[in-house]
Amino acid sequence: MSVINQSIPDQLHEAKIRPVRLWLYFLAALVLLMVMVGGATRLTDSGLSITEWKPISGTIPPLSLEDWNAEFDAYRQIPEYQLINKGMSLEEFKGIFWWEWGHRFLGRVIGLVFLFPFLVFLVQRRLDWKLAPALTGLFLMGGFQGFLGWWMVSSGLSERVDVSQYRLAAHLGAACILFMSLIWVARRLRPSNVLWVQKGWRPLIVLLLVVVFIQIIAGAFVAGLDAGFSHNTWPLMDGRFIPSGLAMLDPVWLNIFENIITVQFNHRMVAYLIFAIVVGLTWHAWAKTQFDGVHGWMLTIAILTVLQVVLGIITLIYVVPLHLGLAHQVTAFVLIGAITAYLSDMSR
């Protein structure tokens, strides 16, 4: 009888907190969609089509020919048009404009989806003070993303024909941290299902998380430098496993961030490292637990890793077609989300 009485408060708490958890998952899904649209914006060279940051009035797209001409005239003043797209028609401009507008509009939608349910949950008393720091942090990170996005775009409006790869990496990295944080907080609101956690296991999963995050940042440099459009063979680059030209820039460390050959080579090497780590962790998790309980995440992580490796190879070989490039980027976020969920579940 005491067990039954004890389960009633647990069931009431679960019913109370479930909508909050689903809300956070939905926000994470929107962030993932935002990343996909951002990737499409990058791959279609659309990111500089809107040359001003108008948080409120920018919500409304051009509605008349006069409005479209005004946007197009502003675009024709920047180096990308003058050096790359000179002679572009208004219809061609609309093609790149809608990608960037959609990306910015989705960011505004995410802000509203955060704010209004938050207020409703406050009125319904579904939130307690323990969640206040986490939700405040999530809100601030979301707002900071908007600033980082404009900071990135502004780097390509005066002296460059594209955005800075450094700022692109910062923007994508911040989006990744926001995505992981949403997953982490949502998982903390679930009942625990931990069966076994060997001493030293969590640090190994943390290591995997850090390496995958580094790989996502490395992928941002590949995208920012268009490094995926060169050396489109695998497993060799220019007929060699270790290509020449890795240290052609001076100082040497600059090659990591600005040498197309080195950037792609490093992205490949980190991928091999991740694959090796995942193989070792998966074998050990199977030997100790047969993927019971929380460790079922390890099997999911292994499958996602194999999928991501395959996607990376075929994306490279086929010279980064839009659908494969987006699949590769989205799968990277799903993978790091799964690792985050695994760690969160183990930490309760």
Image (cartoon, rainbow, N blue to C red):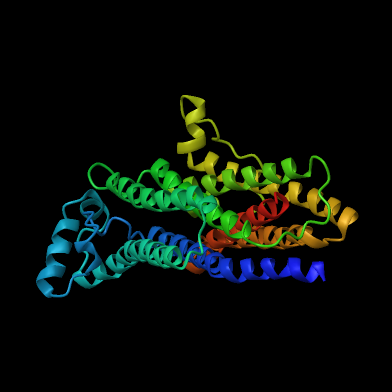
Q: Residue furthest bottom?
A: 64
| Residue 253 pos. (x, y %) | 51, 28
Residue at 76% over, 59% down: 294
| Residue 237 pos. (x, y %) | 61, 47
Q: Nearer the viewer, residue 93 or 137?
A: 137
Residue 168 in view, yes or no: yes
Quadrant location of the N terminus in the rendered image: bottom right
Horizontally, residue 33 falls left or right of residue 282, namely: left
Name the quadrant containing residue 189.
Answer: bottom right
Q: Is residue 263 above or below residue 2?
A: above
Report the number of discs: 0
Horizontally, residue 281 falls left or right of residue 230, namely: right
Q: Residue furthest top?
A: 251
Q: Residue furthest left?
A: 66
Horizontally, residue 285 falls left or right of residue 17, namely: right
Q: Nearer the viewer, residue 282 or 77?
A: 282
Residue at 75% over, 47% down: 276
| Residue 308 pos. (x, y %) | 64, 59
| Residue 159 pos. (x, y %) | 25, 41
Name the quadrant containing residue 298.
Answer: bottom right
Residue at 37% over, 48% down: 144
Residue 226 in view, yes or no: no
